[in-house]
Image (cartoon, helix red, strand yellow):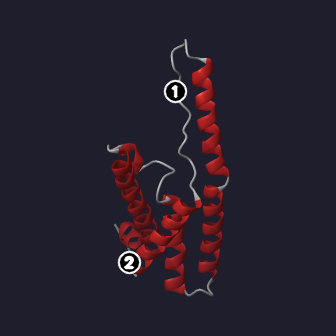
C-alpha cells in the first residue's frame, strides 16, 4: 500500500499521465466531431489532434521545472526527452504514416480481385500544429496540477 501511496504523490508521474489522458480524450472528441461518429480506438490510438506524446512529455518537463527548478537536472533530462519525442512525432512517425497510406492504396489497386488484407496503420505521426497543441495542453495540465 505504501508503494501506491508514493506513486500517487509523484507529481511528475501524475502530471504526465494526466497530460496523456487529457490529450487522448480531446483527440477522441475532436475525431468524433469532425467525422460525425465516435471511434473508441482513438482513446488509445496514435496520431491525431492533439498529440498525446507531446502532452505527456511537456507535462512531465513542466512539472519537473515547477517542482525542481529550471536549472535542475530533472528539468534538463525531461526537456531533452520531450524534444526528441516531439521531433520524432513530426518526422519519422509522420512519414511512416504517409508511407502506410500509400502502401494501402497500392495494395488496394493491385489486389482488387482478392480478399482484402488488413490495412497498415496510417495514423502514426503528427503535424507541427498537433504537436504544438499537445505540448501546450501538457504544460497547462502541469500548471493546473501544481
Residue 74 appears in which quarter of the rendering?
Answer: bottom right
**Residue 32 visible in the displayed image:** yes
- On screen, residue 38 versus residue 80, left or right, reads left
| Secondary structure type for disc 2 | helix
Q: Badge 2, how many Cα within 10 Å: few under 14, some, many 20+?
A: few
Q: Quadrant of the C terminus?
A: bottom left
Image location (x, y in percent) of residue 71: 63, 87
Seen at 36% across and 43% down, the residue is: 39
Label 1 belongs to which residue?
Answer: 118
Disc 2 versus disc 1: nearer the observer: 1
Label 2 belongs to which residue?
Answer: 145
Image location (x, y in percent) of residue 50: 47, 60
- Of marks 2 and 1, which one's residue comes earlier in the chain? 1
Seen at 54% across and 38% down, the residue is: 121
Which residue is nearer to you in this view: 112 or 121? 112
**Residue 10 visible in the displayed image:** no
- On screen, residue 88 versus residue 135, left or right, reads right
| Secondary structure type for disc 1 | loop
- On screen, residue 126 versus residue 11, left or right, reads right
Amino acid at each position: 500500500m505504501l508503494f501506491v501511496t508514493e506513486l500517487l504523490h509523484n507529481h511528475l508521474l501524475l502530471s504526465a499521465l494526466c497530460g496523456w489522458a487529457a490529450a487522448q480524450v480531446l483527440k477522441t472528441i475532436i475525431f468524433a466531431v469532425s467525422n460525425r461518429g465516435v471511434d473508441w480506438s482513438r482513446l488509445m490510438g496514435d496520431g491525431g489532434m492533439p498529440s498525446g506524446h507531446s502532452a505527456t512529455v511537456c507535462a512531465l518537463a513542466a512539472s519537473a521545472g515547477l517542482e525542481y527548478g529550471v536549472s535542475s537536472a530533472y528539468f534538463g533530462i525531461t526537456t531533452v526527452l520531450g524534444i526528441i519525442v516531439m521531433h520524432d512525432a513530426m518526422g519519422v512517425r509522420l512519414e511512416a504514416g504517409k508511407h502506410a497510406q500509400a502502401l494501402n492504396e497500392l495494395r488496394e489497386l493491385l489486389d482488387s480481385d482478392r480478399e482484402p488484407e488488413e490495412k497498415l496503420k496510417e495514423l502514426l505521426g503528427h503535424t507541427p500544429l498537433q504537436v504544438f497543441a499537445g505540448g501546450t495542453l501538457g504544460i497547462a495540465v502541469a500548471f493546473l496540477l501544481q
